[in-house]
Image: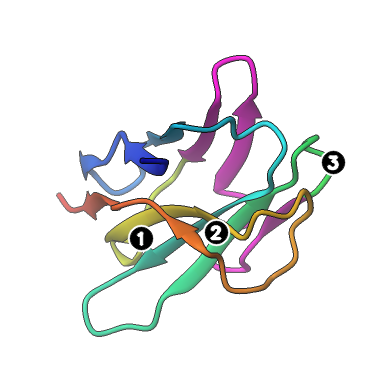
């Protein structure tokens, strides 16, 4: 069964850094744009970032621009989200997802991972 799998979440202090990873079992990520979303308790899901298949498009939400960096290594079939200078409001479950397109469409993805928890607290 094909699926997206996130990892790298955990507890981090404000101002710290964390790297999230997204990989797959069952298919190659290389041809697809990948989104990162997050959802905090009681809040709406937020699209945090997106990277196109060739990395020419890298899109960030205003809330994370300048602090988060999205990248990919297609040879490792992995997408990364580097979180720097994290804030308590970054606490959420982070999901990677794709709608199967090669570019960042902004549409609702069809395929989702199970999520990884990021908690920012001192």
In the rendered structure, does residue 10 fall within the stretch colored magenta? no
Identity of the residue drawn at 61% across and 66% down: 61
Tell me which segment is drawn in magenta: 58-82
Identity of the residue drawn at 74% across and 58% down: 104
Q: Is residue 80 visible?
A: yes
Can you identify the residue that label 1 sits on? 90
The percent coordinates of residue 64 (x first, y second) are 55, 59
The percent coordinates of residue 54 (x first, y second) are 80, 35
Can you identify the residue that label 2 sits on? 64
Give left or right: position of 54 versus 50: right
Q: Nearer the viewer, residue 95 or 16?
A: 95
| Marks 1/2: CA–CA distance | 9 Å
Q: Is residue 16 visible?
A: no
The quarter of the picture where the N terminus appears is top left
Q: How many labels sit on residues?
A: 3
Q: Residue furthest front?
A: 1
Q: Which mark is on residue 56? A: 3
Quarter-wise, where is residue 95 in the image?
A: bottom left
In the rendered structure, does residue 62 fall within the stretch colored magenta? yes
Give left or right: position of 93 versus 75: left
Q: Nearer the viewer, residue 52 or 84?
A: 52
């Amino acid at each position: 069964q094909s699926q997206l799998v996130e990892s790298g979440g955990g507890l981090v202090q404000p101002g710290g850094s964390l790297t999230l990873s997204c990989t797959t079992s069952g298919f190659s990520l290389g041809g697809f744009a990948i989104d990162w979303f997050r959802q905090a308790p009681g809040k709406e899901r937020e699209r945090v970032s997106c990277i196109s298949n060739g990395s020419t498009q890298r899109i960030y939400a205003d809330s994370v621009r300048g602090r988060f960096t999205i990248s990919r290594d297609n040879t490792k079939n992995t997408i990364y989200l580097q979180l720097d200078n994290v804030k308590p409001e970054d606490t959420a479950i982070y999901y990677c997802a794709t709608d199967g397109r090669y570019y960042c469409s902004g549409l609702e993805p069809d395929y989702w991972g199970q999520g990884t928890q990021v908690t920012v607290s001192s």
